[in-house]
Image: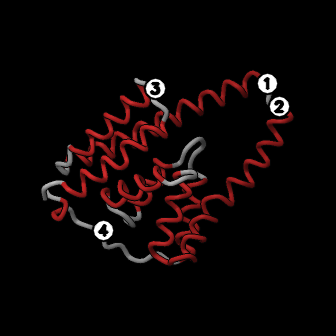
Amino acid sequence: MTDSALPLSQPEVPKLQELFFAFLGIAASGFGGVLPFARRMLVEQRRWMNEEEFAEAFALCQFLPGPNIINLSVIVGSRYHGVAGALAAFLGLVGFPTLLMIFCGYLYGLYGEVPVLRDTLAGLAAGAAGLLIAMAAKMIASLVKAGRVSPLTFVVIGFLAVGIARIPLYWAVLFLAPVSIAYYWWRPR
């Protein structure tokens, strides 16, 4: 299947308050990483993006400095309402967690050395890692299903470089970003 044969989403334009509450819901959904929740909400539930649009936006978010989910909120918000939409999505995403973490920091200062709390936090970290692996598997499955195996080549090279060869991430990005862009720019259509 060629890129032009993939259907692009034509969602109803969300209102500013819908952007705010959607990203507030994402923020309230998880600890240690909410990208899997963001993908499910944006692609599967609200259909504001399709798989390809999400993958492209996520790739851009990975490349840009700063937290990926914040970058994604700004991209989605600005897609529909420019600066106001970006601000609404951003505030929805960071407002509640900021207040919650101030409170949790206070509690951790009081009770952080309690063994049961340390064990609970270790369990939450393992669950967050599982969610991230599940989201990556869904994104890879959609690439394979669409017949776009060449992006998987860059995934494997990146994993081997950073995960196995222990090349610093910035060197891998500095090499793979221009190579992958050049490949997609000049590939046969």
The tag on residue 9 is: 4
Q: Earlier in the sequence, mark 2 or mark 3?
A: 2
- Nearest to viewer (mark 3 / mark 4): 3
Q: Amino acid at mark 4?
A: Ser
Seen in the picture, residue 121 relative to 151 is either above or below; the reply is above
Asked if residue 29 is positioned above or below residue 110 in the image, the reply reads below
Residue 59: percent from the left, percent from the top?
40, 52
Q: Are marks 1 and 3 in contact (CB under 8 Å)?
A: no
Three-letter amino acid code at the position of disc 1: Val
Disc 1 residue crowd, few under 14, some 14–19, many 20+, Cα 10 Å: few
Q: Name the element at disc 2.
A: helix
Residue sticking out furthest to the top: 115
| Residue of label 2 | 111
Q: Please give the name of the residue rendered at 42% of the width and 54% of the height, measured from the top-left corner.
A: 58
Say which residue label 1 marks: 114
Query: Gap between marks 1 and 4, in whole Å?
Result: 49 Å
The amino acid pointed to by label 2 is Tyr
Mark 1 or mark 4, earlier in chain: 4
State the SS at label 3.
loop
- Judge the density around disc 4: few (<14), some (14-19), many (≥20) Cα neighbours within 10 Å: some
